[in-house]
Structures are given as structure tokens and as C-alpha cells.
């Protein structure tokens, strides 16, 4: 992976990882940015699903290993793993033994008290997460659960346990194969060491309908038990937090600059398509879903979805989309503080072909131009699909690129007079 630099030019000519033999992105009709090989080790209840969704949106579907846990890995040929660039899921460190040598491992830590509370709440509300634990935990309060050894031992020091749980990958797979040959399917929900959670099946959708719980709202005794039972995780988290705090701050603009400076992204200066089963440069996009219409992506779970595009300066860009939304008037598009006018080219029921222009004055120089799509609300599609959904996208492209001045001028946005000590803003545009 490239090393992030704070607006410092790369040391001489440098070809990004994996770039050998590839043409410039602009020579392709489909968006195809370079991507490093990653292994994201997903620790339970650390917001890992959100990060997995984000990472999955950055790689072509055929470059993502389809297995997300050890049992699913049994159905893959290990010799085929070299075909993939993204590996993620509930695995332990032993997976690294089976992966190509140039894979970079990453993980995500969560504040241990908040993680444990989230874990306890998930055990008591979701029978598919851990059926045996659910039978014990359902309907009980947090004060009771932390005092039940059968439950709390499943939830304490989980992050450190999994990171220290090194068993060779071949050993894990051999054990699973032996169990299946013997007709014995190990119960992942058995009350055992926290490291056993690595073999639990991943819930398809995972969010807390109760919302987050403030640890300070718990009784002092309950909070003290959670802290005591997570002493190792707390020490690990604080050590990592201290180390990260010593790094210089990195802004979103710095990230965009680095992506361009190292050639991971090439400035878009010609029309380009974004495959629905390929990388989508932005946030709040669900995974690609196959359908009779050729596949699509839902946006959500928030009412705001973004595209982060490396648009070349000095040009106007037309963005075309095919979207499904019940009320098209509820969808707005913004670049910075300016609302972009949406043109409707065709409609068929709730499906619409729309387009809008991004004028050169709204293009971020030496960075990523953020386009924000906003809807009034999200909805739930059915009783079995718990995802909060915003709108569906079936096609997306930069359909036209023209010299600056082609797009209609944007209306002026009134700026309110500052009152009191107004926050400082960056002067001008890069």
C-alpha cells in the first residue's frame, strides 16, 4: 500500500502497486481504479459491517473473496485465493497463512465498554446471532446479563482474544473437514472462550433498533463489572489510541490528493461508466444485487449518499443515472453548498433516467469532488429486509465532459451574515 503523505509529493516517479501492464483509467469505458490487496479481520461488534460494506464498494465483485468465515472457506479451492484482492470477514490471524504474500492485514478496534454493551444487546435480541445465548439472554436487562457468567464470558476481552488467537489456517480447515466427515457440526454458540466467536455465522443485517446505549447511563456497579472483565481490551485500545493520536491529522482533502498523486486515481477527463458490480467511489452504498434488469445497488442506511469523484479541473461534467425512487422530487443533488439542477430524461413508474451537470467552478482541484444525494427519508422494504433504504441505482456514468461554461450557471446561494464568533472556514478553493 502507498504511505499517506500530508500534501508531500511522492519521492520521484512511482508506479502504484499492481499497476504493471494496466492502461490509464481514462482508456477504459468502465471505472477501474487500482486497488491494493487487503485482509480486513472483522472483530465482532466493532462496526465492521459498515467497513466491510465500504471496502466491498471499492473492489470489482470478482476480485473479492466470496467466503466471509472459515466454514464458507471450505467450499473454495485454496489455490484460487490468488485470484482475489480483498479478503474480509470473521476470520482469525491464521488466514494470513493461506493468503498471497503481498496482502496487507487491517482491523478496526472499538472502545471496549461500548463494544461489550452492543454485544450483550445483540445476544438478547437476535436468535440468529447465537441461538443458545439468546435463550439465556432474551428479555433480560444489562444489569442481569453482566452478572451471568454464561453470557459475560462470551463478551469480554473479545478483541484481544481474537487478535492473539493464532492457529494455522490449514489446521482450522482440517478440523472443520474432520468434523463434517464425522457428521458432527460444531456448535459455534457453545459457551466457550471468546475466540470461538470467530466461527460464528455472520448476520446478514446487523443494527441496533434500540439505538446506542450511553455507558454512563448504566449503574456504577454494572459499569465497573464491564470494565473489570475487559481489562485487556481496554489496555489494548488505549495503547493503540495513544499511538494513533501521535500521527499528524489527515483531512479528506489530503486523502484525495494522495490518491491522485500516487496514480491510484487518474483525473476523469472523458466519459466513464461505473459498473454496478464494481467499485463505487463514495459512501452509503449497499452491495450490488443481481436482478432481471442487470443488477442494481440500493443506497442507505442514511438519507445522504455521496460520490467522491476525481474530476479534472477546467471542465464541466454531465452525470447520468437510472434511479428508482417513489417521489423523484424528494431527491436533491448538491456539490458543496450549491444545489445542482436535475433533468428528467425519461420515467416509467418509479424508475427514472436523470442527469445533472457539475460545473467547473464546483470541481475540487487536486482532490475529490463530493456530490451529495439527499432524500427526505429512508424506508424498510419488507419485514425480512431490515435495511433502511433510500433510493435504488441501476446505472451511473459520467456521460459528457465539456469545456468549462457548457453547464448552465448555478443560481447564487445567499450567505447569511455571521453572528458572534463564526467558525473559521478555508479561504477560496484549491
Image: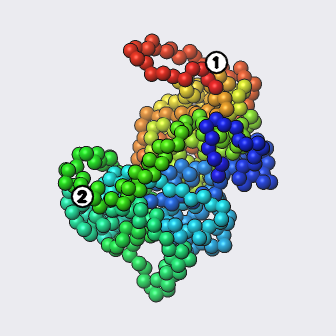
Looking at the rendering, in which quadrant would you find the C terminus? Answer: top right
Instruction: Assign a secondary structure to mark 1.
Output: loop
**Lateral position of residue 399 relative to residue 208, left or right:** right
Q: Is residue 216 left or right of residue 411?
A: left
For residue 36, what is the image quadrant?
bottom right
Q: Farthest residue in the top direction?
A: 417
Residue located beneath label 2 in the image:
225
User: Can you give x and y, in whole percent of width and height, for residue 254 in the image?
Assistant: 60, 36
Q: Looking at the image, which residue sits at the far bottom?
A: 182
Residue in front for this viewpoint, 389 or 405:
405
x and y percent of residue 129 in the render? 37, 63
Q: Secondary structure at mark 2?
A: helix
Whole-percent x, y for residue 247 in the image = 52, 43
Q: Nearer the viewer, residue 73 or 6?
A: 6
- The residue wearing badge 1 is 409
Q: Nearer the viewer, mark 2 or mark 1?
A: 2
Which residue lies at the image location 47% right of the left edge and 32% below the top edge? 330
Which residue is found at the position 32% from the left and 47% from the top?
A: 212
- What is the x, y in percent for residue 418? 43, 14
Q: Is residue 324 visible?
A: no
Quarter of the figure with residue 335: top right
- As measured in the structure, the alpha-carbon distance from the residue carrying label 2 to the one carrying label 1 is 61 Å
Q: Nearer the viewer, residue 269 or 16?
A: 16
Q: What residue is at 38 percent from the left and 62 percent from the top?
A: 158
Amino acid at each position: 500500500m502507498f504511505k499517506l503523505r500530508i500534501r508531500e509529493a511522492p519521492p520521484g516517479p512511482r508506479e502504484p502497486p499492481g499497476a504493471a501492464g494496466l492502461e490509464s483509467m481514462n482508456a477504459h469505458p468502465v471505472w477501474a481504479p487500482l486497488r491494493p490487496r487487503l485482509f480486513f479481520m472483522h472483530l465482532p461488534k466493532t462496526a465492521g459491517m459498515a467497513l466491510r460494506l465500504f471496502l466491498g464498494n471499492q473492489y470489482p465483485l470478482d476480485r473479492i473473496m466470496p467466503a466471509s468465515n472459515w466454514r464458507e472457506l471450505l467450499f473454495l479451492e485454496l489455490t484460487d485465493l490468488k485470484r482475489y484482492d480483498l479478503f474480509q470477514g470473521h476470520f482469525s490471524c491464521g488466514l494470513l497463512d493461506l493468503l498471497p504474500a503481498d496482502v496487507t492485514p487491517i482491523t478496526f478496534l472499538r472502545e471496549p465498554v461500548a463494544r461489550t454493551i452492543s454485544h450483550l444487546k445483540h445476544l438478547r435480541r437476535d436468535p440468529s446471532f447465537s441461538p443458545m445465548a439468546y435463550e439465556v439472554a432474551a428479555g433480560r436487562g444489562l444489569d442481569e446479563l453482566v452478572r451471568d457468567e454464561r453470557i459475560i464470558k462470551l463478551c469480554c476481552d473479545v478483541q484481544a482474544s481474537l487478535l492473539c488467537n493464532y492457529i494455522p489456517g490449514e489446521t482450522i480447515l482440517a478440523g472443520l473437514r474432520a468434523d463434517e466427515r464425522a457428521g458432527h457440526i460444531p456448535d459455534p454458540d457453545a459457551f466457550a472462550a471468546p475466540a470461538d466467536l470467530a466461527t460464528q455465522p455472520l448476520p446478514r443485517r446487523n443494527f441496533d433498533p434500540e439505538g446506542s446505549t450511553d455507558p454512563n447511563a448504566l449503574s456504577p456497579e454494572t459499569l465497573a463489572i464491564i470494565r473489570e472483565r475487559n481489562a485487556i481490551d481496554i489496555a489494548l485500545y488505549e495503547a493503540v489510541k495513544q499511538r494513533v493520536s501521535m500521527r499528524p491529522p489527515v483531512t479528506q482533502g489530503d486523502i484525495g490528493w494522495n490518491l491522485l498523486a500516487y496514480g491510484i486515481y487518474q483525473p476523469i477527463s472523458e466519459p466513464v461508466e461505473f459498473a454496478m458490480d464494481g467499485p463505487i467511489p463514495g459512501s452509503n452504498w449497499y452491495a450490488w444485487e443481481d436482478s432481471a434488469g442487470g443488477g442494481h445497488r440500493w443506497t442507505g442506511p442514511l438519507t445522504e449518499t455521496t460520490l467522491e469523484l476525481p474530476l479534472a479541473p477546467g471542465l464541466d461534467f454531465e452525470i447520468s443515472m437510472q434511479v428508482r425512487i417513489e417521489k423523484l422530487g424528494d431527491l436533491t443533488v448538491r456539490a458543496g453548498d450549491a444545489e445542482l439542477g436535475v433533468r428528467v430524461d425519461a420515467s416509467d413508474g418509479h424508475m427514472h433516467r436523470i442527469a445533472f451537470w457539475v460545473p467547473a467552478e464546483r470541481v475540487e482541484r487536486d482532490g475529490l469532488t463530493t456530490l451529495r444525494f439527499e432524500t427526505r427519508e429512508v424506508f424498510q422494504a419488507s419485514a425480512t429486509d431490515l435495511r433502511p433504504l433510500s433510493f435504488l441505482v441501476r446505472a451511473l456514468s459520467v456521460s459528457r465532459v465539456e469545456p468549462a461554461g457548457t453547464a448552465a450557471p448555478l443560481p447564487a446561494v445567499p450567505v447569511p451574515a455571521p453572528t458572534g464568533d463564526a467558525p473559521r472556514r478555508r479561504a477560496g478553493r484549491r
